[in-house]
Amino acid sequence: MPTELKITPELVALHGLKPEEYERVLSLIGREPSLTELGIFSAMWNEHCSYKSSKRWLRTLPTKGERVIQGPGENAGVVDIGDGLCVVFKMESHNHPSYIEPYQGAATGVGGILRDVFTMGARPIAAMNALRFGAPDHPKTRHLVAGVVAGVGGYGNSFGVPTVGGEVNFHSRYNGNCLVNAFAAGLAKSDAIFYSEAKGVGLPVVYLGAKTGRDGVGGATMASAEFDETIEDKRPTVQVGDPFTEKCLLEACLELMQTGAVIAIQDMGAAGLTCSAVEMGAKGGLGIELDLNAVPVREDGMTPYEMMLSESQERMLMVLDPDKRAEAEAIFVKWGLDFAIVGKTTDDLRFRVLFDGQEVANLPIRELGDEAPEYDRPWVEPKPRPVISASDVPAPSDCGAALLSLLGSPDLCSRRWVFEQYDTMIQGNSLQRPGGDAGVVRVDGHATKALAFSSDVTPRYCEADPYQGGAQAVAECWRNLCAVGAEPLAATDNLNFGNPEKPELMGQFVKAVEGIGAACNALAFPIVSGNVSLYNETHGQAILPTPTIGGVGLIEDRTKTARIDSLKSGDVLFLVGADGSHIGASAYLATIEDREDGTPPPVDLAVEKRNGDFVRSVIAKGMVRTCHDLSDGGLAVALAELAMASRLGADIEAGDGPDHAILFGEDQARYVVALAPDDAQRFEAAARDAGVPIRRLGTAGGDRLRIAGRLDLTVRAMTVANESWFPSYMSGTLVEPPAAA
Amino acid sequence: MKTAVVLLPGLNRDRDMIAALRTITGKKPVTVWQTETALPDVDLVVVPGGFSFGDYLRAGAIAARSPVMRAVADAAAKGVPVLGVCNGFQILCEAGLLPGALMRNAALRFVCREVKLEVVNARTRFSTAYEEGQIIRCPVAHHDGNYFADDATLKSLKDDGQIVFRYAEGTNPNGAIHDIAGIVNKAGNVLGMMPHPENLVEPEHGGTDGRGIFESLLGASTSVAA
């Protein structure tokens, strides 16, 4: 075997392998690896691909359920939605590339997650994006927001999937490390799901899609390290997206799958050809032999090392039924895509790579994945914070001004500037677009069903108490699905944390996963897919712990849903759940008092479930058609959002208690609902029967939101405050939000 | 009414258009792939929206040179109604079937939102279901919808009643000159428009204002939501 380069400790370190990990390589293969082999190990054993720090904790999450067809471990999770149909979905991060090159980083993040979904035979029907940026006044933030949003739109719009939801947050802890978490969901027939497990010996391994270039060589290894000032040098590790080719690849793959030619299929994502080939072989208990001279390349003189580690986009690998070869090839020719037989399955469990007639790698295929290092990293329990009660915080001198400040704050203002750059209605099935509690998409071709999607996490809660924060992320996602009337089915988790080698940060991860697990169990909301992104820190400063939860819900009868913008004059408004009391770690505290201390609102999962089940039941009965969950900013912000979306005011009595606790407390498990006055009694009786506390808040009407004794604002003034921040900020003409009207 | 939908790689609102045509005409449209050189005998040819060939080079430029577009030009010359929506409009301009060009949006960003359209000319075969001066709702979703033409072209568009739809009530989303959203050729059988009527044709879309274009072609004079 040719050794192109001497393997030195420096070279091993450059590949992100620790000395003890390299020892493990040596003992596994009993000799020094070739450079290509070192590259393969580096690709398979980095944090991004091997989950070596997180695996042990991920195993504790609930992943099963009546409707779960496929949990974690495949390209995406698969959940049964009845009538022979299923929803296929996953969320994945593209944080590091997006910080280095925001447009392409975000674009290829979207491309990667879409490929994960259609590799399984599902046509993508919805996308979401959870984005976290640094402080607005940080010099890089505007550039990153502009680039990331344009990149998400540029790829998704061209590919043709509606973006129906997402999140945008700002915090100084993301100054050196933004987060781009891309979610995609697709629709498939339950009996036509495609998996990556190779079957059958001696069958052709086929390369599909775009050509291989030098872009992204070593991307996954880059994403598994902390950042410092040399990151600009890492720009060549960011891939370049081509949504046109991906769209063609989607259509070609779906046509191909109809022919019965596909035995196994796997997209080439992180660590490209290496990861996809090893995964297909190892899962099927087979070896794989690749001949790199057959790989379609974009550039001359590519070495085996570069081909094996390239992260060029829009590529797939499949095991083909040889009888269907001509038919399969014709489809790819029609779509102008490469179709090349690059290898075969073998029975020797070896991963063999040939180039110019020489063997450049010969490794045990199972061990590449299974024997990856796994760590039980030391961790410490996060320090509990003191509880802050409302009486510890001064009440606002002007509740109306406080509400306007919140509505015009970077974290709570309208995201219209962002979501109008996304095609939110393509495919013609979007029933609820961004701006409400969840995106709702019709199940194409089905007479009654629809699917709901929401992405949630409150990073400042996770920072304050990782366990409660993890549980809250799940609870809020579940709640948002309930708020549109959907039965929450399952979720995907995208766990973004700092360096796991630091015990405090590992402690955040461990406790957040524990909280997520507890909430998923209590709410029967299993995790069916996900992704872990660690080492999100720059110069030793870690991001806020950000375990993003992407949830999917099912609406059986789409004529019985609730939305945020359907408030009618004369409707009676009710609060579902208890009055506000909790002010610690709230948006109010951060925005008005400029404090981020205190504990987050505790999550009572039994109450969450009871209240959510109740809300869904009254929506399903057709009683409630307008609903909004309470989250950041509490009752006052929720009422303002309802009023702004519906362009209608309301007269409200919010009950006794400290103004800031009642108006802005962020107690969990709460909703505002509106219904016709004739239904009010029936609604109150139903709440009594369900043991759910409710408060009659008042009546909708007029053009002002009046909360008796507390505030009185025109809907227009709130809208101006809410809509102004983003466009002003992005155009560089930011002005202070207007004073109370 | 028999219809055909042109398919080019990278188009992505073809499925929306096919669904709308099926809903409204009651018949599934025929699809015609980019390499075909002849069109079936139909009452309407549609070039739908998307990003044909990625819109690399210039929106619609590569698609306009595909074999099927020569067939579309032949059909248009024979008087067959041709409708181009969004990328379809860009392709028809690039193919020389409609005058003018669609530049990058004035804000240099993709925009997806609902706008208002004024029906400027209700006498074309695409607009008889509307009243002249009627304001309808319609979604837009594009990056390059900023219509432009030279003064002489604009004058003749106006004089000959070729401007069919204009963005109304200050909702011009892209900086298009004279708020132009949709135009017909001189013969009146080729309509190009940036907004997406196919995404507003059933109650679950939140409205049916877009139906009028298809219903005009159907010859049905059923009215649409005012």
Image: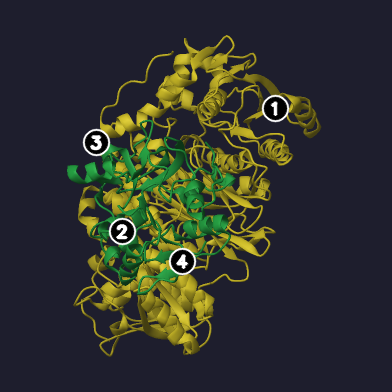
* Local secondary structure at mark 3: loop
Q: Which residue is mark 4?
A: B42
Residue A23 visible in rendering: no
Type of residue at label 4?
Val
Q: Nearer the viewer, mark 2 or mark 3?
A: 2
Give the image's coloring scheme: by chain
Tell me if mark 2 has few (under 14), some (14-19) or many (20+) residues whose alpha carbon lies within 10 angstroms of its own: many
The chain to which mark 2 is attached is B
Q: Nearer the viewer, mark 3 or mark 1?
A: 1
Type of residue at label 3?
Pro
C-alpha span from label 3 to label 1:
50 Å
C-alpha span from label 4 to label 3:
58 Å
Q: Are marks 3 and 1 on the same chain?
A: yes
Pointer 4 with pointer 2, Cβ within 8 A? no
The chain to which mark 1 is attached is A
Identify the colour of chain A in the image: yellow
Q: Nearer the viewer, mark 1 or mark 4?
A: 4
Q: Nearer the viewer, residue A376 or A136?
A: A136
Residue B101 at what x, y percent from top left?
24, 50
Q: Nearer the viewer, mark 4 or mark 3?
A: 4
Tell me if mark 4 has few (under 14), some (14-19) or many (20+) residues whose alpha carbon lies within 10 angstroms of its own: some
C-alpha span from label 4 to label 2:
20 Å
Residue placed at 40% from the left, 54% from the top?
Answer: A156
The answer to whether residue A2 is left or right of residue A737 is: left
Q: Which residue is mark 3?
A: A139
Q: Could you tell which of marks 3 and 1 lies nearer the N-terminus?
A: 3
Q: Could you tell which of marks 4 and 2 lies nearer the N-terminus?
A: 4
Q: Which residue is mark 2?
A: B91
C-alpha span from label 1 to label 4:
50 Å
C-alpha span from label 2 to label 3:
40 Å
